[in-house]
Image (cartoon, rainbow, N blue to C red):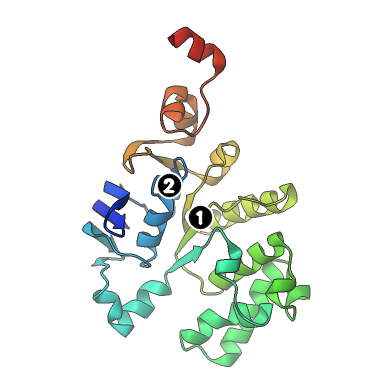
Amino acid sequence: MRGVGLGYSYLEKFTALDDVTLYVQRGEKLALLGANGCGKSTLLKVLDGLVFPQSGTFHAFGAEITEDGLEDEQMSMGFRSRVGFVFQNSDAQVFSPSVREEIAFGPLQMGLTRDEVSSRVDDVLVMLDILDLADRAPFQLSGGQKKRVAIGSVLVMNPEVLLFDEPTAALDPRTQEWLTQLIEELSSAGKTIVHATHDLDLLDRIADRCIVFSEEHRIVAEGKPHDVLADQDLLVSVNLVAQQQGSAARSR
């Protein structure tokens, strides 16, 4: 995936991305870092073809991804089967009457046979340890259980690229550890993973490379997790950590 000079504004006046250029390498774990409102989630939406840059270009799998292009059914199905997006808020993603129907929805839309869909759904339910939830309504589930169902609805499509928006936000420690291990396993299986996160404590496990956004909606740094975490001045400048009192006092 490659975005060059990406620009996007909501309502044509609230800037979300300002001249953003990035490359996503096949098989890497890429973390997007930055304060709330810096553009991370909007960039994920561009990578998923949910919104389209108002300036610049976005290419994936050898083709430019545009709104007109995705109106072509064959191109749209090809792209959407290769990219999966797990939203921060599972309630925005989970809508079917039962867990089983939720996970089956995507592959049914792609035209797979019911036998193939049933087999995929069963495999995902077992893999995510939610087989006992198969006939439950999503609204009856806990936040962590909904997160598993949302992930299942994406994994059942077997996408090449997985996009996560704040994957560990609002999860209890046990579910957070489970999800971190899952991301590691998916990476080991060759999936490309891009996620927006504030969770610096897990960065070494869930990222090979980091891209850092400023509050001006631009990329201001990139590097390996260890190098980014070691740059305290950078983290303070982009509002990812608070300036220590001692440092503030010395600067006066």
Q: Quadrant of residue 48?
A: bottom left
Identity of the residue furthest to the bottom in this view: 114
Q: Residue at x 46, y 33 (%)?
A: 239
Quadrant of image for the C terminus: top left
Quadrant of image for the N terminus: bottom left
Query: How many labels, in total?
Result: 2
Q: Please tell me whether residue 172 is drawn above or below residue 72 in the rendered image.
A: above
For disc 2, the marked residue is 37
Q: Please tell me whether residue 102 is drawn above or below residue 15 in the rendered image.
A: below
Q: Which of the marked residues, 1 or 2, is nearer the chain's N terminus?
A: 2
For disc 1, the marked residue is 165
Q: Residue at x 73, y 68 (%)?
A: 141
Q: Is residue 123 left or right of residue 27?
A: right
The amino acid at mark 1 is Asp
For numbered disc 2, what is the local secondary structure?
loop
Give whichever of 207, 92 is nearer the camera: 92
The amino acid at mark 2 is Gly
Q: Residue at x 60, y 36 (%)?
A: 201
Q: Quadrant of residue 137?
A: bottom right
Q: Residue at x 40, y 35 (%)?
A: 223
For numbered disc 1, what is the local secondary structure?
strand
